[in-house]
Image (tube, rainbow, N blue to C red):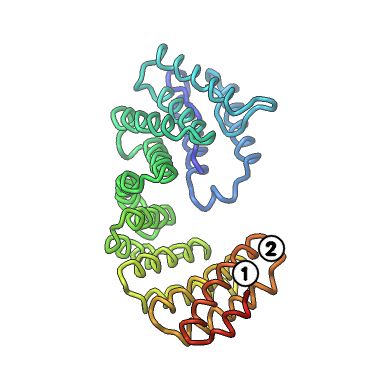
Amino acid sequence: MRLTLATPTHSVPHAALGRLCYGIVLTLTRNGDVRLALSRRTVDALTAAWQSVLRTIGFSAPEPTTFGDSTGVTPAERAARLELALDSAVQTLGTHHPRTIAARNNLASKYAEIGRRTAAIAQFEQAVEDALATLGEEHPETEVIRENLALCYEDAARPSEAAGQWESLVQQRNERMGSHAAETVSARASLASAYRKSGLYDAAIAHFELAIGDSRGVASDELEGMRIGLALALKAIGRLEETCGQFRMVLAQRRRRLGARHHLTLSVHHQLGRAYVAAGREPEALRTLRQTYRDCLAAAGDHEVRLLTMRVRRDLAGVYRTAGLHREAAALF
């Protein structure tokens, strides 16, 4: 989820109060745990309340934000409006003004939303550069824009460049909030994932292990995602026994949390079976894939499960053939 930025006004009376309100809104929408809980309607309501406070105490009306599109306005039209807003801010305030930086981030976010990744990256890169020059590395707005840029790099399959942004975010959050803070752990996990996708498996493993070790209070699904990422990095360098161990832990957790026949549980059960195959542990592979296949058949009403069932059946047949059980393999088709 990329975040848009409301635009505070600094050159009016009671600016300190205005900045405080702005900081509260920004903090709420940046916090990883709160971000998941806030609905679009809640964010809109909070923003509207803040704007009401500004009007009451005499602030100029801020530029419109992009928490939600107006009824009947297409995404392309919304992007065009944001382009005009940015052009206006550049002409009247200059490139490095905080409101211009916020407007550029909002335009980049809209570009990313409608699939214009190249344009989005260009605007995010410029926004980061301007924010660093004007606000500094440690400013919350700089951090928001940097995270948006990292996510956009990931969407564009540019993991090495994403890793560079996550490195900065991990360092900043670790210094400001400590290694155990949810935002630090989340950024470190994202850094580890970017390293893995870049082929830097040892670095990925080190950061996944740190993130898991620091993940006090992290949601179960996030921790499971870290363990899966660690398992994939371990598998890539041939540490297959450890790979199986990570998949087993995720499987046990998902069975408790979601049930044995949930698509996400079945998916990791399948991955465990494949890891056993790669490790040459034929009996465990056969037992695991056979049970996964049975659970898939029992939950085959789910479209995603039906697709997974075909992959599990293919892999189970392969193990049967390797074990010389050709009749059992043929019976699957």
Label 1, residues with CA under 10 Å away: few <14, some 14-19, many ≥20: few
Residue 178, image x, y percentages = 34, 56
Location of residue 164 with respect to 322 vertically, above or below: above
Type of amino acid under label 2: Asp
Type of amino acid under label 1: Leu
144 or 243: nearer the viewer: 243
Quarter of image, res 77? top right
Q: Residue at x 61, y 76 (%)?
A: 293
Secondary structure of the residue carrying numbered label 1: helix
From the viewer's perspective, is 291 left or right of 182?
right
233 or 178: nearer the viewer: 233
Q: Which residue is mark 1?
A: 258
Q: Which residue is mark 2?
A: 302
Location of residue 276 with respect to 107 vertically, above or below: below
Location of residue 176 with respect to 326 vertically, above or below: above
Q: Residue at x 36, y 55 (%)?
A: 197
214 or 79: nearer the viewer: 79
Which quarter shows the C terminus? Answer: bottom right
The residue sitting at the top extreme is 92
Mark pair 1, 2: CA separation: 15 Å
The residue sitting at the right extreme is 301
Label 2, residues with CA under 10 Å away: few <14, some 14-19, many ≥20: few
Total marks shown come to: 2
Q: Residue at x 30, y 64 (%)?
A: 206
Instruction: Please state which of the two labelled residues, at mark 1 or mark 2, is closer to the viewer.
Output: 2
The disc, 1 or 2, on the residue closer to the chain's N-terminal end is 1
Residue 19, image x, y percentages = 46, 30
74 or 328: nearer the viewer: 328
From the viewer's perspective, is 301 left or right of 234?
right
Residue 274, image x, y percentages = 46, 74
